[in-house]
Amino acid sequence: MPEVTITIGGRSFEVACQEGEEHYLHTASKLLDDEAQILADQVGRMPEARMLLMAGLMLADKTASVEERVSEVQAKLNQCEAELAALKENPVEPERIEVPVVPTAVMETLAELAARAEAIAEAVEEKQRA
């Protein structure tokens, strides 16, 4: 079983861990050391046991907050999954929208009127030039 030296709050500790778990131990000790450093900056020097207790409590508080948020997100995810399953079981029919069709005769008449208007505009422009 490997022995790892970790530093928390400026103090070194020898800790045994499972083979291959050294990285996780270093990561966890870094989290604890960060909290201990905050305490040391705020309070100053304190007994080892108290420092470890307070740093552990601060981490536990953060963990509880994260777990609460995870629970909220999980509940929201479960709700969304239930809504999705309900929609898959009973798909909503798309709303039918009817678009009026302009009769061909009206389109032809409008085109003819446009052509006449253009011809009149050209005639007026020619008279103005003359």
Image (cartoon, rainbow, N blue to C red):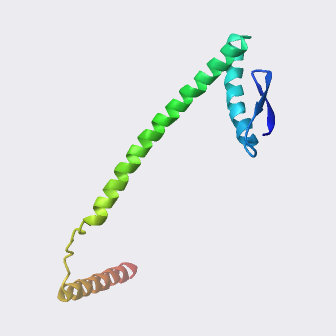
Q: Quadrant of residue 128?
A: bottom left
Q: Position of residue 2 (x, y in %)?
A: 80, 39
For the N terminus, which image quadrant? top right
Taking the image as shown, residue 53 lies to the left or right of residue 63, namely right
Q: Nearer the viewer, residue 89 or 123?
A: 89
Residue under the point 75% across and 21% down: 9
Q: Quadrant of residue 87?
A: bottom left
Q: Nearer the viewer, residue 4 or 117?
A: 4
Above or below: residue 130 compared with residue 70: below
Residue that sits furthest to the front in the current view: 1
Q: Quadrant of residue 19?
A: top right
Taking the image as shown, residue 107 lies to the left or right of residue 18, namely left
Q: Nearer the viewer, residue 70 or 130?
A: 70
Q: Nearer the viewer, residue 4 or 100?
A: 4
Q: How many marks?
A: 0
Q: Position of residue 126 (x, y in %)?
A: 37, 83
Above or below: residue 104 compared with residue 68: below
For the C terminus, which image quadrant? bottom left
Q: Position of residue 110 (x, y in %)?
A: 23, 83
Taking the image as shown, residue 117 lies to the left or right of residue 48, namely left
Above or below: residue 44 compared with residue 3: above
Residue under the point 42% across and 40% down: 72
Taking the image as shown, residue 74 lies to the left or right of residue 82, namely right
Residue under the point 76% across and 41% down: 22
Above or below: residue 21 compared with residue 107: above
